[in-house]
Image (spheres, rainbow, N blue to C red):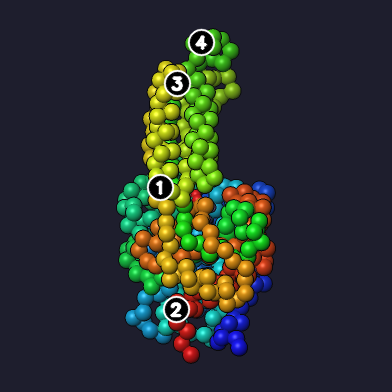
């Protein structure tokens, strides 16, 4: 005998249409998205999300760092809301689903409850967190970090992009600074739906990832200073090639991460050489080393070995080096009850599922500090993400959002 509501499902075509419509805002050059935080495209995507939320009968609140909160009232005004959502900002060569599935999956959840006139005791809030990606303004998960009390708002607002523009000024420029105090909202629970961004679920043939933990992250910005000189007339022994020093340090990064196989990872995605002229030996190299592991002691070991190797290499090559921690968070254990609600939902709906540790960082990793939190993952094709070719299937989007719906209904308490 099916339990009440067991066969409740979202409208997968309506969700897909919304995903494809959002994908047209801030398009990339190869079928994905370039809707970086606090750009005009971000502002346009925010406006479209607000329009859809208001059409679904929700009221929008925005805090002073641009986090958006669309509320569907519950029957008990004193009950703390259940939050869902993720982020609408993308990488420069981002996909259509990273973050967006969690935000629009939350909207679809509300649309479905409206269709079926289902009321819940707890209100439901669909969230768009500002600057999850940390690509334009480091670090990642910046605004959810302020909300969780990890960063101060002033510290966040002073972050600058590659052109020297301030986060706070860009937030004002696109007109998305709200009036709510950041972090004033209290949550009953939070569930974030997100694509896996890795190959595990697809390889295992699993439709749902029940995310029990999130691995920790460390971003160290390294600046090596050598000396600009002519690439043609400077004899090799006289060169102080900061680009070469960077290359040697990055080889060490690879070895350090591989020494902690199979779970640790390491690379540099942000790399600048100055003056970046074809016939000038780079006098300065600036790059950010991204280390990750589920084990905090491994992260600490990798950071220490990077520091030691970078200083040794700079010394050997007669250069200066500076290392600055510019982002990071410890490994995360999500709330057992919320994780159980996700697992029960997948079970009840008959979706194949497995426990998984999140390889990527997410806003949920910070929100887990201030409210019971869990994540739901769906597979992505070839595990590819942070690439315009990122793809998911409609069925995966459906499965993830169905599980989100049921986990939230269990937590928000359906009122008969
Ligand atoms: O870096 C991350 O893991 C996330 O995609 N911002
Ligand atoms: Mn994301
Ligand atoms: Mn991302």
Report whether residue 268 is seen.
Answer: no
**How far is mark 3 from mark 2, CA to CA?**
59 Å
Q: Which badge, 4 or 2, is on the more N-terminal residue?
A: 4
**How far is mark 1 from mark 4, CA to CA?**
41 Å
Residue contact at pointers 4 and 2, CB within 8 angstroms: no
Residue bearing mark 4: 237
> Of the residues tagged 3 and 2, which is closer to the observer?
2
Q: Which badge, 2 or 1, is on the more N-terminal residue?
A: 1
Frontmost residue, 355 versus 110: 355
Q: Which badge, 1 or 3, is on the more N-terminal residue?
A: 3
Q: Quadrant of the N terminus?
A: bottom right
Residue 412: give its label: 2
Residue bearing mark 1: 296
**How far is mark 1 from mark 3, CA to CA?**
33 Å
**How far is mark 4 from mark 2, CA to CA?**
69 Å
Q: Quadrant of residue 392?
A: bottom right
> Of the residues tagged 3 and 4, which is closer to the observer?
4
Q: Is residue 106 above or below residue 165?
A: below
* Disc 3, SS: loop
Residue at image x 58%, y 19%? 279
Q: Is residue 220 above or below residue 380?
A: above
């Amino acid at each position: 005998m099916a339990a009440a509501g067991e066969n409740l499902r979202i409208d997968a075509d309506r969700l897909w249409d919304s995903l494809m419509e959002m994908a047209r805002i801030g398009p990339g050059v190869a079928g994905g998205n370039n809707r970086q935080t606090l750009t005009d495209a971000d502002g346009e995507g925010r406006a479209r999300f607000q329009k859809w939320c208001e059409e679904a009968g929700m009221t929008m609140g925005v805090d002073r760092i641009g986090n958006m909160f669309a509320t569907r009232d519950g029957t008990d005004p004193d009950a703390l809301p259940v939050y869902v959502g993720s982020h609408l900002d993308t990488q420069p060569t981002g996909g259509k689903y990273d973050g967006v599935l969690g935000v629009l999956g939350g909207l679809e959840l509300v649309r479905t409850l409206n269709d079926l006139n289902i009321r819940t005791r707890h209100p439901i809030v669909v969230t768009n967190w500002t600057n999850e990606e940390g690509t334009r303004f480091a670090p990642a998960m910046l605004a959810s970090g302020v909300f969780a009390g990890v960063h101060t708002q002033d510290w966040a607002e002073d972050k600058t992009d590659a052109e020297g523009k301030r986060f706070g000024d860009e937030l004002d420029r696109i007109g998305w600074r709200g009036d709510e105090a950041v972090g004033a909202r209290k949550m009953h629970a939070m569930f974030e739906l997100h694509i896996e961004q890795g190959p595990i679920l697809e390889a295992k043939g699993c439709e749902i990832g029940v995310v029990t933990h999130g691995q920790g992250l460390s971003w160290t910005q390294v600046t090596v200073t050598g000396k600009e000189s002519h690439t043609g007339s400077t004899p090799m022994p006289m060169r102080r090639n900061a680009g070469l020093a960077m290359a040697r340090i990055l080889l060490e990064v690879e070895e350090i991460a591989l020494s902690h196989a199979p779970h640790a990872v390491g690379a540099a995605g942000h790399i600048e050489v100055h003056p970046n002229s074809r016939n000038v030996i780079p006098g300065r190299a600036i790059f950010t080393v991204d280390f990750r592991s589920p084990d905090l002691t491994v992260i600490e070991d990798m950071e220490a070995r990077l520091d030691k190797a970078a200083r040794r290499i700079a010394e050997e090559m007669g250069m200066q080096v500076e290392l600055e921690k510019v982002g990071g968070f410890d490994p995360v254990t999500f709330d057992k009850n919320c994780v159980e609600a996700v697992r029960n939902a997948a079970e009840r709906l008959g979706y194949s599922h497995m426990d998984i540790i999140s390889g990527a960082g997410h806003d949920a990793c910070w929100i887990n500090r201030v409210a019971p939190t869990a994540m739901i993952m769906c597979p992505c094709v070839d595990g590819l993400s942070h690439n315009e070719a990122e793809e998911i299937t409609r069925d995966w989007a459906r499965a993830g959002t169905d599980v989100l719906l049921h986990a939230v209904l269990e937590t928000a308490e359906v009122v008969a």
